[in-house]
Amino acid sequence: MAGSSTRPTSRDVARVAGVSQAAVSLVLGDKWRGRVSEPTARRVREAARELGYRPNLAARNLRLGRTRTVLLVVPALTTEFFAGVYTGAARIAAEHGFGVVLYPSPEGVGPAKDPFASAPAALDGVIASSMAADALSAIRGDQLPLVMLDSDPEGSLGAATVNLDIADGIRQVADHLLELGHRRFLHLAADIPSWTFEVRADALAARLAAVPDSALRTVRAPISIEGARRVAEEALRDPEYRPTALVCDDDKLAAGAYKAARRAGLRIPDDLSVTGLDDLGLATAIDPELTTVRLDAERFGERGMRALLAVLEGVAPQEGDIPVTLIPRASTAPPPRPRP
């Protein structure tokens, strides 16, 4: 076919691979499992690659009644975590001939506006990260498959859900600090009314409630470095409550807590241990480097896209939360000894 101006067809692929056109359609339409053998599927893909064959997606979409386009709705585009979610989702989508449109919902609160004249006509499905299902009513209506990421499985209005094991991440943080000897905790919580942040607060409170001599105070701050600094600074000035460990809902809040600690004359970790959650690039940019919980955002996005593909095929998505990992660094140490 080299040097030919004729565009290769599925018949050409079938001839080179030594299979039927039906088999080519199954393989390149990702419908081959259980109907075509793995070696045959591999042979078809190699033939298509060799010939430079590209399926006519417009014609196929008309036949299937699909646009092969997915909308990924996130609270904001300024967060490294959501960039990772998009990267993972787009990777899996591309493997299956889908495109992903990224759409931020204002400040992560609903209702999100429909970015199209008619989303059901423009999309095959929606993946929404860290949002309430009812915030998507204008986009989804009752006509589009929906997968919710980082959302309450019981409040998802029947949508499939994919979650990170955030509760276990918080328990790992608490256990780490308890093992170091901390008993007086300050929780710098996000001030957003969201299921994922409720999970963090509940998991921390439950874990510390099992330790008789522990104490916990919670204050809420906007998810910004300066907002967190203001709230943490006020909390650390309180003479009635002197924490030795500050647990933050995410790494941005932790960075604000660092500034507050310095203004209060406290050294990290000598006087105050600080933890975050996310393991953003920020975690190793601040000094001392931050003990935090690593969330695999790209894997999260991949699982979300796989779940939507499963829903489109009418099968149950993979179950089970995605594990998270505590990354201990230099921001945590045993609490200071009481002064004589």
Image (tube, rainbow, N blue to C red):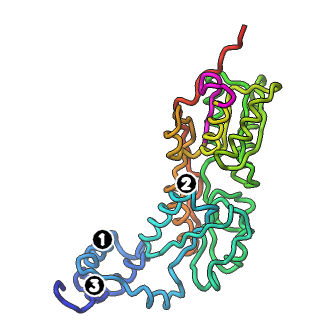
Marked residue nearer the N-terminal end (2 or 3)? 3
Name the amino acid type tagged 2. Phe
Name the amino acid type tagged 3. Ala
Q: Quadrant of residue 273?
A: top right
Bounds of the magenta segment: 263-276
Marked residue nearer the N-terminal end (2 or 1)? 1
Disc 1 + disc 3, Cβ < 8 Å: no
Q: Marks 2 and 1, how far apart in space?
A: 35 Å
User: In the displayed structure, would residue 252 be above or below residue 214?
Assistant: below
| Residue 264 painted magenta | yes
Mark 3, residue position: 14
**Helix, strand or loop for disc 1:** helix
User: In the displayed structure, would residue 306 be above or below residue 16?
Assistant: above
Mark 1, residue position: 42
Quadrant containing the N terminus is: bottom left
Disc 2 + disc 1, Cβ < 8 Å: no
Residue sitting farthest toward the right: 240
Q: Position of residue 76 (x, y in %)?
A: 61, 61
